[in-house]
């Protein structure tokens, strides 16, 4: 970033001594906009100001960006090296490789298929190409050219085996399209996936519904456009007969939390709603903040603010229902996470342990959006 800092007159500011920390008003956890505008070009100013700062994140920490949880691992370092650091373009071979690894077959079969496609299966033709002194004729049938195509798709024993397995009719059409084993295999794999997918959509249309993106009244832009407000929710009659209401545990209340994200207004909206045993919304609150942040952080902030709100209302016996599995999982299993998301969640968990009584976080669903619509 250093090279893009324009100088504002000789010696005006000694940029060498500045760090990112100087650009932040630490007491309020907001960007020092005036200083940033002084130092950077307008488009850079906008991207800095659009980087969210979270008061919940108290300490700086080193983040390993190649892992979701921000913690270093050899596995991800290897991945970075192979994919980004070292140029291995010359080793890459185009093909439907994931089709091989997704096969539900023993690893040794995948390995065999991979070796054939990678053209490192030691057929006689291959051996000769690597300098081995041997004839190129097939060991079994005197065909002059023992390559993978011959071994797997051409010689009689192979075709008999495919026929016995009753799959030759699936393989044969690919042979007229391609003349080498890797292309034939990729083609067959692709056809298998295509037929699997079309079978799925025919037999279970519900699956498609489930995979549709979230779209409810609470996901729309309208919430984020409204000004901050708190209001007491009215007793919601059960207009939506299809809501499968999950009762709070006995003697407890339940607080549903949801966040909405508006790119157009660069805002995150948070809605929370406390429900009683009958599923009536007894209290609700909405709030928003800017700039936009990633979904997991927005939802984590939702839970963070909900726990504070519950505390302000002097309630303790409340459980929470959220929309994002990551949130519920983190709360319940509390795995170490070095990221901002982790910091916010740790903060919330600590707060719950101190101020709330045995609060659970459950994975909910659309109840809240429906209740508030
Ligand atoms: Zn042969």
Image (cartoon, rainbow, N blue to C red):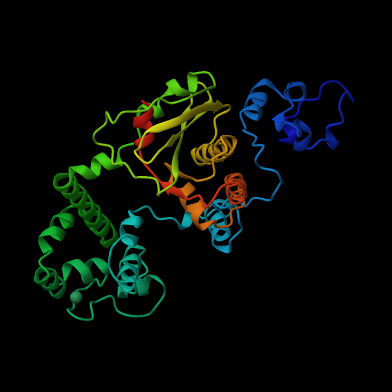
* Nearer to me, 336 or 7: 336
Q: Position of residue 246 (x, y in %)?
A: 34, 45
Looking at the image, residue 102 lies above or below residue 41: below
Q: Position of residue 132 (x, y in %)?
A: 39, 78
Q: Position of residue 372 (x, y in %)?
A: 38, 28
User: How many numbered circles are shown?
Assistant: 0
Judged left or right of residue 299, residue 175 is left
* Nearer to me, 233 or 158: 233
Judged left or right of residue 66, residue 131 is left
Judged left or right of residue 102, residue 275 is right
Q: Is residue 321 visible?
A: no
Looking at the image, residue 213 lies above or below residue 178: above
Residue in view at x 61 percent, y 56 percent: 71
Looking at the image, residue 104 lies above or below residue 231: below
Looking at the image, residue 334 lies above or below residue 137: above
Task: Give the quarter of the image for residue 96.
Answer: bottom left
Instruction: Check the picture and name the quadrant holding the N terminus.
Output: top right
Task: Give the quarter of the image for residue 52.
Answer: top right
* Nearer to me, 66 or 309: 309
Q: Is residue 80 visible?
A: yes
Judged left or right of residue 180, residue 297 is right
Residue in view at x 54 percent, y 21 percent: 228
Residue in view at x 28 percent, y 75 percent: 136
* Nearer to me, 371 or 17: 371
Q: Position of residue 98 (x, y in %)?
A: 35, 56
């Amino acid at each position: 970033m250093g090279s893009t800092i324009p100088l504002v007159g000789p010696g005006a500011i000694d940029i060498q001594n500045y760090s990112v920390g100087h650009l932040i008003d630490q007491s309020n956890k907001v960007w020092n906009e005036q200083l940033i505008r002084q130092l950077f070009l307008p488009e850079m100013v906008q991207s800095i100001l659009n980087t969210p700062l979270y008061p919940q994140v108290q300490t700086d920490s080193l983040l390993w960006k190649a892992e979701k949880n921000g913690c270093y691992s050899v596995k991800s370092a290897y991945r970075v090296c192979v994919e980004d650091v070292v140029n291995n373009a010359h080793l890459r071979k185009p093909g439907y490789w994931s089709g091989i690894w997704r096969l539900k077959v023993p690893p040794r079969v995948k390995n065999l298929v991979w070796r054939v496609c990678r053209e490192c299966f030691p057929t006689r033709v291959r051996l000769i190409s690597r300098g081995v002194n041997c004839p190129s004729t097939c060991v079994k049938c005197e065909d002059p050219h023992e390559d993978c195509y011959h071994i797997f798709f051409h010689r009689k024993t192979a075709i008999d085996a495919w026929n016995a397995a009753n799959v030759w009719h699936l393989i044969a059409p690919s042979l007229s399209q391609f003349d080498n084993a890797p292309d034939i295999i990729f083609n067959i794999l692709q056809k298998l996936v295509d037929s699997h997918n079309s079978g799925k959509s025919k037999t279970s249309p519900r699956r498609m519904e489930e995979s549709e993106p979230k779209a409810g009244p609470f996901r729309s832009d309208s919430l984020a456009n409204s000004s901050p407000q708190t209001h007491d929710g009215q007793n919601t009659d059960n207009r939506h007969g299809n809501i499968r209401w999950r009762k709070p545990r006995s003697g407890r209340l339940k607080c549903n939390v949801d966040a909405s994200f508006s790119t157009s207004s660069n805002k995150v909206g948070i809605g929370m709603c406390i429900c009683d045993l009958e599923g009536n919304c007894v209290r609700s609150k909405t709030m928003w903040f800017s700039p936009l942040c990633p979904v997991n952080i927005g939802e984590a902030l939702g839970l963070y603010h909900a726990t504070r709100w519950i505390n302000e209302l002097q309630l303790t016996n409340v459980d929470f229902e959220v929309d994002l599995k990551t949130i519920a999982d983190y709360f319940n299993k509390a795995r170490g996470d070095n990221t901002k998301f982790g910091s916010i969640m740790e903060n919330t968990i600590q707060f719950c342990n101190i101020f709330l009584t045995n609060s659970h976080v459950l994975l909910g669903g659309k109840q809240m959006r429906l209740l508030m619509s």
